[in-house]
Image: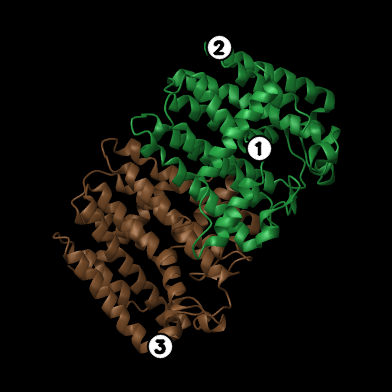
Chain colours: A brown, B green
Amino acid sequence: MNFNEELNRRTEEIERLLEGYLPQESGFQKTVLEAMNYSVRAGGKRLRPLLIAESFRLFGGEGKAAEPFMAAMEMIHTYSLVHDDLPAMDNDEYRRGRKTTHVVYGEAMGILAGDGLLNYAFETALRAFDIDPGNQGIPEALKVLASKAGIYGMIGGQSVDVQSEGQALSREKLDFIYRLKTSALIEASMMIGAILAGAGEEQVKKIEQAASDVGLAFQIQDDILDVTSTVEVLGKPIHSDEKNHKTTYVTLEGLDKASADVERISMRALDTLAGIGRRNEFLEELIRYLVSRKK
Amino acid sequence: MNFNEELNRRTEEIERLLEGYLPQESGFQKTVLEAMNYSVRAGGKRLRPLLIAESFRLFGGEGKAAEPFMAAMEMIHTYSLVHDDLPAMDNDEYRRGRKTTHVVYGEAMGILAGDGLLNYAFETALRAFDIDPGNQGIPEALKVLASKAGIYGMIGGQSVDVQSEGQALSREKLDFIYRLKTSALIEASMMIGAILAGAGEEQVKKIEQAASDVGLAFQIQDDILDVTSTVEVLGKPIHSDEKNHKTTYVTLEGLDKASADVERISMRALDTLAGIGRRNEFLEELIRYLVSRKK
């Protein structure tokens, strides 16, 4: 297997799938639909849908119930970026080299496009009931989606992050933010793939644990790249954490320990994954890639 | 039956139920949870949960599956108000005589509290699977909740409303906004009550039709009160539509026709309801009350 080729192929598959789930840009409410689609089409790694698909594959999932969840997960990730970028939040004008949604469509439409994506994510995931009515895991997968995206998941982490702006953070609080803001959706993705494939409770717990480590290592790698990369490679401003006086894993623990910890935590994730007793080599490669990525 | 006493009693029941579904204000993310609860506790008529309960009762519903949906519906209604009030939207500092959420908690927290409520609404409604696992209507009720709250429902209407600010509206566009922005959640409420009570497709269509008229009459009555009421009675500024150069049913059709249409449309709603062949006298009274209300 050539990992990079395979990654490109599977990511393109997800792009096509996503496109098929986006709303048609028509009707009086055309603008909000355009703003939503603009946000989703801005690209990105499509990591979370990829993880749903690979976790579903790991557990030998059959049928198409995972597909609407893949689209829904990317919508939730995207809405969180759209709202994060708003003037009252991070006030970012560019993301992935393109103007952010509120810059193109105005602030009110930025708020509504985010709301629209969050709501449409649930509408989309609920289509699983029609796509694969026999899949008994759908209610549980919906619960995981909702809880990991919400106030005890991503929104909870985001709100503590916002409130901590300009303040020095304890390691405990930083861990909380990373676990909720970054890991929660990664956990949800891998859990949903497993649940829809029919994995048992114990297996779902293991995949949650592995995913939690993947998310943590991924986030620490993000902190490292903010210090060590260049604008050209990263496609976004570097040293932004320093400029914003932001506590990160790197500012708390130093670059050397941060790098060693990415290695250690991602190894632990792979160990946990190995303990599941099934294998998905691409997923293992993907995890190695994510934590050693340069952008 | 003394309608007013009964209305108070049932509304208080809903207040208690709602309170039980609100998140505990603890943890690092305490502030966003406080902002969410502050918004929900600001009060209001609790009309939508009331309509779920009464529609459920109309169709002889049994069990408790409607309860999480009642709480979820009020959370969705509340989040829409919190986001509507934001500076980039209507920029309202007061609602129901209290400071709006973003005024008390800041704009970022206003956005996040709204996101939190929308997401938690789905988390809450999904609890129905645990509360009444035997209720076969839950997936359909979830679909109605999501679709009527979303880009082809409330958010769609809201986005056209926002975009039309300061513009003269055609009757067609105004109808679209009213149907989506106001009627959609009222339709969803009555449909969800019916679906969870086991009503058939035909009955659900009838209740949707009745609810659509209730929503329309309710909204026109709102326009009328903006012109005819006082700040003291209404608890919010009057003549706000005129000040904002807003096209309303009253500016398009005049006060007399608007009043006659409220009467006509609400009668049509009651007729449709009568065609269902079951009766809920309180629900009928409630509809009469809503469209003749003075605040």
**Above or below, comparing residue B258 to residue A119 in the picture:** above
Residue A147 at x, y percent in the picture: 41, 52
- Real-space CA distance between mark 3 and mark 2, rounded to the nearest whole angstrom: 72 Å
Q: Are marks 1 and 2 on the same chain?
A: yes
SS at badge 1: helix
B136 horizontally vs B32: left or right: left
User: Looking at this view, is B176 or B108 the one in front?
Assistant: B108
Residue extending furthest toward the left: A277
Residue at label 1?
B177
User: Looking at this view, is B104 or A13 the one in front?
Assistant: B104
Residue A1 at x, y percent in the picture: 17, 67
Chain of the residue that carries numbered disc 3 in the rendered image? A
SS at badge 3: loop
Location of residue B232 by image quarter: top right
Residue at label 2?
B275
**Above or below, comparing residue A199 to residue B295 in the picture:** below
Looking at the picture, which amino acid does disc 1 mark? Answer: Ile
Residue under the image location 55 percent in, 41 percent down: B18
**Above or below, comparing residue A209 to residue B81 in the picture:** below
Chain of the residue that carries numbered disc 2 in the rendered image? B
- Real-space CA distance between mark 1 and mark 3, rounded to the nearest whole angstrom: 54 Å
User: Looking at this view, is A78 or B99 the one in front?
Assistant: B99
Graded by Cα atoms within 10 Å as few (under 14), some (14 to 19) or many (20 or more), the crowding at tag 2 reads: few
